[in-house]
Amino acid sequence: MKTIGMIVAVELQSVLKRYGAKLVKRKETAGYQVLEYETDQYRMVIVNCGPGEIAAASGTQFLISEYHVDIVMNFGVVGGLTEEMSKTKVCIVEKVVHYDFDTSAADHTEVGRYSQYPDIFLPTTKVLSDTARKIHPELVPVVCASGDKFIADPEQKIRVHEMFSADICEMEAAGIVLTCNRNQVPCMLVKCVSDGIEGGFEEFQETMDAAADLCLEVVEKIVAGMEISKR
């Protein structure tokens, strides 16, 4: 039986609403709230890591080291950086740019570029994103700008889009993808837009629960369609 690791930053209530009655284990360990859910096909271990890149990276490594997960998944709510990325649009992340990682003053490298990568983009696992789009064709492939700040200002959203060709923004994807790539563990990130280009924290608060519920519903459909136990 395959084990899926799921990283959850701030959308835990959606997880509990969907899986709460079906959980086989719920415990606190290493400072994390860990939930376990099983079907005949797979085991899912869900870690509530909290917001931010460091929290997401450490939570991802915890899943890999302690639970030896075969796949890491992340679902969550994000901000839209273009007019096309309107509220409740569900996306599959193909590439991530860590937009506030900057060593350019020391080595003249582009902002967001890690030296072990050929460009500024951190790739997710293509075979997983391709499979997800076959199962759920409505998924929009996107570039995700990830950094340790909540972007509420429309002008800043436009700047990030123009600098990095990014479609959405959030605070965990870079930490998750970097950690998975270093461990050679496949990863898939499904996101739902909670606040559009003109939206800010108030819109995020108003729509977060509905967006998270929709996103998790899509993730569940993808997992069921992947026949993970046979992979």
Image: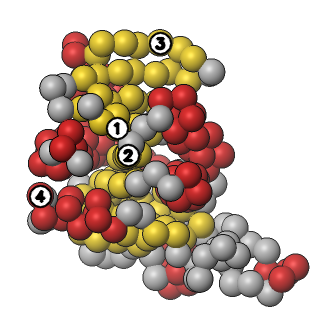
- What number is the disc on residue 27? 3
Mark-to-mark CA distance, 2 and 4: 17 Å
The x, y position of residue 125, in whole percent, is: 38, 63
| Mark 4 residue crowding within 10 angstroms, few (<14) / some (14–19) / many (20+) | some
Q: Nearer the viewer, mark 3 or mark 1?
A: 1
Would you say residue 133 is visible in this rendering?
A: yes
Q: Position of residue 180 (x, y in %)?
A: 51, 53
Q: CA distance from mark 4 to mark 1?
A: 18 Å
Name which quarter of the figure residue 61 lies in.
top right
Label 3's element?
strand
Q: Are marks 1 and 2 in contact (CB under 8 Å)?
A: yes
Rendered position, 25 above or below 89: above
**Amino acid identity at mark 4:** Ile
Q: Indicate left or right for 209 with 181 as reference.
A: left
Q: To which residue does mark 4 refer?
A: 135
Give, as a three-letter code, the residue at label 2: Ile
Mark sitting earlier along the chain (2/4): 2
| Sequence-earlier tag: 3 or 2 | 3
Mark 2: secondary structure: strand
Q: CA distance from mark 1 to mark 2?
A: 5 Å
Q: Callout 1, which amino acid?
A: Ile
The N terminus lies in quadrant: top left
Question: Nearer the N terminus, badge 4 or badge 1?
Answer: 1
User: In the image, what residue occupies the spot 22% across and 13% down?
Assistant: 21
**Which of the numbered marks, if any, corresponds to residue 71?**
2
Q: Tell me the tag on residue 38.
A: none
The residue at which mark 1 appears reads as: 4
Closest to the camera, between mark 4 and mark 1, is 1
Q: Is residue 221 left or right of residue 122?
A: left
**At 29% from the left edge and 65% from the top edge, which residue is drawn?**
127
